[in-house]
Image (tube, helix red, strand yellow):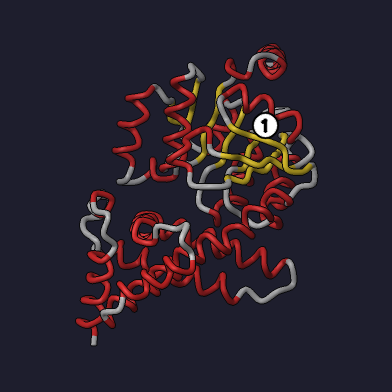
Amino acid sequence: MRLRFAAKRRRRAEVMSGDPRSWKVGLVGYGEVGRILAEDLRKAGVAVAAYDIKLDDDRAGPLRDHAAKIGVVLARSHADLAGQADLIISAVTASQAVPVAQACAPAIGQGTWFLDFNSASPGAKQRAASRVDGANGRYVEGAVMTSVPPYRIKVPLLLGGGGAKELAPLLVALGFDARVSSEQLGVASAVKMCRSIMIKGLEAMVIESFTTARAYGVEDAVLASLKETYPGIDWEKQGAYFFQRVIEHGRRRAEEVREVAETVREAGLTPWSAQGTAERQAWVADLADDGLFGARGTKEFARSPDWRTEADRILAMLKAEK
């Protein structure tokens, strides 16, 4: 037993000091972001393992099919994943950032990197770091600065924490567009969270504004006025994109904005805007779960550039409820 443990430690030391493309990357969370990262890492020849709580229920089928197709090893648990990975990337919903760190910590290897990809408050990142660093792992916060799908693994990524400078070039070698924001833990996440007040808030405001305008039949006048004030924005295209993203990912976005609200509270302010944004995003997610926008998981809206179809569905539902 001691010999096997010593050999494992020697191998880990050799791997961690060498080419990161020889690492095994462990993904916690095999949703949209996790699958994109897995695909790009596998194309680069990197070994990838993954774990997702959906693997334990009736949602496992598509995840298993995807993993088999691209050569990802599926772990049995957080501990199973943590025990075999040289770099752990946590890409789950915001509320699970700290629980995932806590679940991985007991099995994490000496010196194993833990990259927290989640949209969580600086306080949450600090709590997650205490779990990982306390188990002799190496925690680095990551702040994803825009939507992942258009950029894939090259999505702009800010890093923070004491190990950020060391990890940054290693991530770049793996294909990431990573740069150090600060060696102080929480700074990168603060940038992300403050940006999200604007981005996620604008999504919620557009849905509320455009749907209300449609109800009164004044949408064309509203769009014309917006174009005059902000001529650099294609409001038709932007509105369609915002509707699409919230319909497809409103649940995840609502959780993120609740973390945004917590970030605002940590600064000493009352998060009136963030709270309202979270409620609107969650409301749209509830409608999507109830099938208002078509069968769950379809790309029906993504095929249409017209947000009016979805606004009309919302208005018809509200009328039926009266």
114 versus 172 height, above or below? below
**The image quarter in which residue 17 lies:** top right
In the rendered view of the protein, which quadrant contains the C terminus?
bottom left
Say left or right for 71 vs 314: right
**The image quarter in which residue 317 lies:** bottom left
**The image quarter in which residue 7 lies:** top right
Please name the residue shown 37% across and 29% down the image. 67
How many numbered marks does the figure carry?
Answer: 1
Image coords of residue 45 (percent x, y): 48, 16
Image coords of residue 273 (percent x, y): 57, 73
Pointer 1 residue:
113
Residue 292 is at least partly visible in this image? no
Image coords of residue 38 (percent x, y): 45, 30
212 versus 243 height, above or below? below
Image coords of residue 286 (percent x, y): 35, 67
In the rendered view of the protein, which quadrant contains the N terminus?
top right
Residue 135 is at least partly visible in this image? yes
Please name the residue shown 40% across and 55% down the image. 249
225 versus 25 height, above or below? below
Please name the residue shown 33% across and 40% down the image. 60
Please name the residue shown 60% across and 62% down the image. 260
Say left or right for 185 vs 89: right
Residue nearest the observer in this picture, 9 or 119: 119
* SS at mark 1 in the image: strand
Which kind of residue does numbered mark 1 sit on?
Answer: Trp
Say left or right for 26 vs 112: left
> Crowding near pointer 1: few (<14 within 10 Å), some, many (20+)?
many
